[in-house]
Image (cartoon, rainbow, N blue to C red):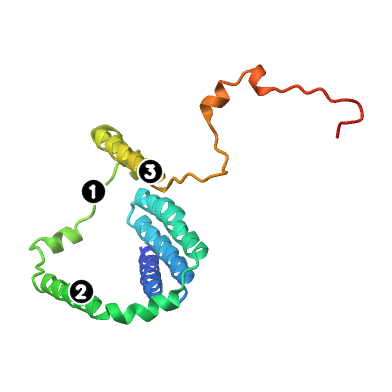
Amino acid sequence: MIVATIAFYLFAAVTIAAAFMVISARNPVHSVLFLILAFFSSAWLFVLMGAEFVAMILVIVYVGAVAVLFLFVVMMLDIDFKSLRSEMLNYLPLGGMIGIILLLELGLVASTWVFAPDAASLAAAPAPAADSGVTNAEALGRVIYTQYVYYFQAAGMILLVAMVGAIVLTLRKREGVKRQVIADQVARTPQTGVEVKKVEPGQGI
């Protein structure tokens, strides 16, 4: 129990520090690296909570895809961040107004927060014993692929349509670029695919 508590405070502190460094680092590459560290620390917090499936998804999707994509985009694009920071003063009034509104909303939420009467008893009550033969990921898989299988397939179709739409929107035809035509390749015959030339003696390469 003590080890779990120490690990929780350690990973929580790392997550908060990494999140602060994401917005305070001057180098955008360093910001993305700190973001990856924050994701890893958050994943360990989920592991401590017993949600290893959520931790795995956080590492695979956000660290393995999103954050790495951010890193490559930042490294490959030649963006003048000094000019962007110099124009920040032009948007400072609008950003300050939005920040004040958000602080007021958070203040209203904090002022109206009320603890439930049975919150202390629920926190002190032990968690129900989980089935020792079923892991967290297996239990989620049973629910997703049985009760919510149609919603899962619908989400996959939406992502497929979004991917195809992104490819279509970014597809550009350029002159002089050879493209693969599957129909022409399948329809090739020995007569159209092979050309026999008669080379005279002494004229070959």
Which amino acid is tagged 2?
A: Ile
Whichever of labels 1 and 3 marks the residue nearer the N terminus, that label is: 1
- Please provide percent x and percent y for residue 57: 38, 50
Please name the residue shown 39% across and 78% down the image.
85
Compared to 182, does 65 lie above or below? below
Label drawn at residue 163: 3
Compared to 43, does 165 lie above or below? above
Secondary structure under tag 1 reads: loop
Whichever of labels 3 and 2 marks the residue nearer the N terminus, that label is: 2
Point out the image quarter for the N terminus.
bottom left
Q: Residues within 10 Å of mark 2 (few under 14, many from 20)?
A: few
Point out the image quarter for the C terminus.
top right
Distance in Å between CA atoms under marks 1 and 3: 42 Å
Location of mark 1 (residue): 128
Q: Residues within 10 Å of mark 1 (few under 14, many from 20)?
A: few
Location of mark 2 (residue): 98
Secondary structure under tag 2 reads: helix
Left or right: 184, with 158 as reference point: right
